[in-house]
Amino acid sequence: MFIFKKLVFTEWFRGFFSASFVLYLIITVANLISGFMRSSVTPMEVMVGHLIETPAFLNMILPIACLVASMFSIHKLKSRNELTAIFASGYSRQSFVTDIFQASLIIALFQFLLTSYLDPYIKRNREQLFDVHTDKIDAFESQGLSSSTIGSGKIWYRTKDYFFAFTAFDKNKSQIKDVSLFFITTDKLVSRVIQADQATYIGQSYWQLDNVKVLKDLESESFPSSSVHEKLDLQLNETADDFLQIEADITTLPIQDLARYIKKLEQAGINTGEYQVLYYNKFSSALICIIFSLIASIGIFNPNRRTSSFGQNIAFVFVFTLLYWLVYSYTLELGNSSKLHPVLACFAVPMMFSSFLIYFYIRNRKLR
């Protein structure tokens, strides 16, 4: 039986890597051509941008590659009459499906690690990994911001005049939660500290701070002075749009830090639907790899090669892929706009296909 298992794994992974290569090649050609046609970027920046986005491309490719791997590996076994011989030799359909499940589970784990750790790592360290700046990096640096999430759980960045720390930014209300400002002198000494429960943007770089505590003259040899204000208007170098860009750094967080950040946003009373979609999508995309592999394996219930058409398989993959991305993208967009619960937005498509699989296998009852 090990021989049969090895045969299934060999054919499945051969189909998987072939499909992944072809799909990635198509995306690469299309993306590079689109980039080279832009006059505002250099060819090197286009190449680097493509490499940075490769994990996102693989996130789209791998589920379809799993579907193609199952479908075409079974078709190949049918065309050589090996599928019939396998089942006639006592290797059950249940064992065959289990082999495909195990193969797809390996890809699903890789998919999860890719989206949860590798993709954030590349985006977080893109300047160190690639000795060239993309447009996005240039736009970020041109505003003089340097942001990071450190052990305190706050987002920090530094400008020429001060350090700024905050827990979360509510883009709907243009409010910063749990604000701390540390003003520094030209001698790199902290001269003033301002803490507030929140800061609301009121226009022209002015922010209104609520429940404010101020410490002044920290750089002097005398004792600092302190004051408390219910409201305080303060002019900063940043507008609300700048904090939207800072918060975009959430895509650089590994999954455990992302979960903690979402929890802090919820505690601050901010709608986290968009971020929960980002979080749950890492799990659902991995699960889809397994489901697609099993959906394509229903061909084992009809092992006769005369009923298997290569052209029909191609057409099925094309239509199925198109419908999948249309429906899945639409549900994710509903989740991002808070029109659909994040869990339902990410798992509606997997649940739909899982229901089909359960129904199909129960109806056939041949997995013995």
Image (cartoon, rainbow, N blue to C red):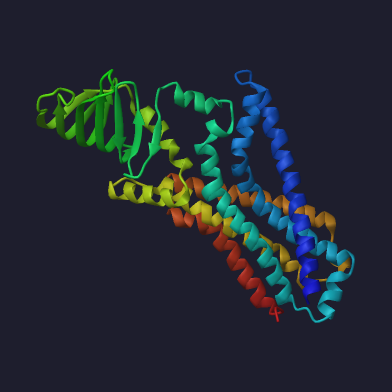
Asked whether residue 276 appears in the rendered view, the answer is yes
Quarter of the rendering occupied by the N terminus: bottom right
Give the total number of marks visible in the rendering.
0
- Residue 271: x, y in percent? 34, 46
**Going 72% across and 75% down the picture, which residue do you hit?**
95
Quarter of the rendering occupied by the C terminus: bottom right
Pick out the residue farthest to the front. Answer: 221
Please identify the quarter of the rendering in which residue 27 is found: top right
- Residue 48: x, y in percent? 62, 31
- Residue 67: x, y in percent? 70, 57
**Going 19% across and 25% down the picture, which residue do you hit?**
233
- Tell me: 355 left or right of 336: right
**Going 43% across and 44% down the picture, which residue do you hit?**
337
Front-most of 138 and 231? 138
- Tell me: 164 left or right of 24: left
- Tell me: 234 left or right of 345: left
From the viewer's perspective, is residue 269 above or below residue 53? below
Front-most of 182 and 221? 221
From the viewer's perspective, is residue 267 above or below residue 347? above
Asked whether residue 308 appears in the rendered view, the answer is no
- Residue 184: x, y in percent? 26, 23
From the viewer's perspective, is residue 74 above or below residue 211? below
- Tell me: 178 left or right of 263: left
